[in-house]
Image (tube, grey):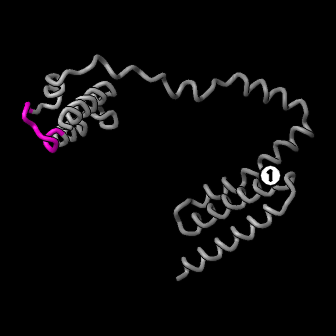
Amino acid sequence: MARLILLILIAIGAWYLWQKIKSSSPQERRKQIFMACIAGVAAIVVVLAITGRLHWVGAALVLILPVLGRLLSQLSRYLPWLMPLFEKYSNRRPNPGATQHPPPHNTEGPPLSEHEARRILGVDADAGRDEIISAHRKLIQKLHPDRGGNDYLASRINAAKELLLSILG
């Protein structure tokens, strides 16, 4: 019952907020949407902290982030010599996205024949749909990249299954 009441209150609040944003001028609309998002995140963090799903230190850090943004802008106004140092530091740091994701490798390999696909999955020439799917499932559980296998083997197993199932129709 408490969840239903909370859900109704959230729906009423969202409707009221939507009406207020819809009736405002385009200049004010952006500011109101931003503030609504900040308030929504803060409310979610508070609820998670109260229910024990988020440690209170994490909640405090998330709620302090907007204050830190304002503090940084104030700091740049009162200490202008600090901004060139910050810009020099931020330009020197490597791009984190460039080092975390290596370029994808070509994992396709040469095209498979029906005989090779059957050898990969370890099924006979008269194997049915269920047997092919079962053999694929067993192999992919052992050789999936998330379980210590590699992309090439997983892609070959998937290609073998797709080929054999397409032949069966």
Looking at the picture, does residue 99 appear above or below residue 44? above
At mark 1, the secondary structure is: helix
- Res 11 quadrant in image: bottom right
Give the residue displayed 84% in from the left and 26% down from the top: 84
Give the residue displayed 58% in from the left and 29% down from the top: 97
Looking at the picture, does residue 46 appear above or below residue 155? below
Position of residue 125 measured from the top left corner of the image (x, y, whole percent): 8, 30
- Outermost residue toward the front? 169
The quarter of the picture where the C terminus appears is top left
Give the residue displayed 21% in from the left and 36% down from the top: 165
- Res 121 quadrant in image: top left
Position of residue 70 measured from the top left corner of the image (x, y, whole percent): 82, 48
Query: What residue is pinned by disc 1?
Result: 30
Choose between 51 and 131: the one closer to the eye: 131
Choose between 168 and 43: the one closer to the eye: 168
Report the number of discs: 1
Choose between 21 and 90: the one closer to the eye: 21
On the picture, is 140 further left or further right than 102?
left
Q: Which amino acid, mark 1? A: Arg
Looking at the picture, does residue 115 appear above or below residue 27? above
The residues colored magenta run: 124-132
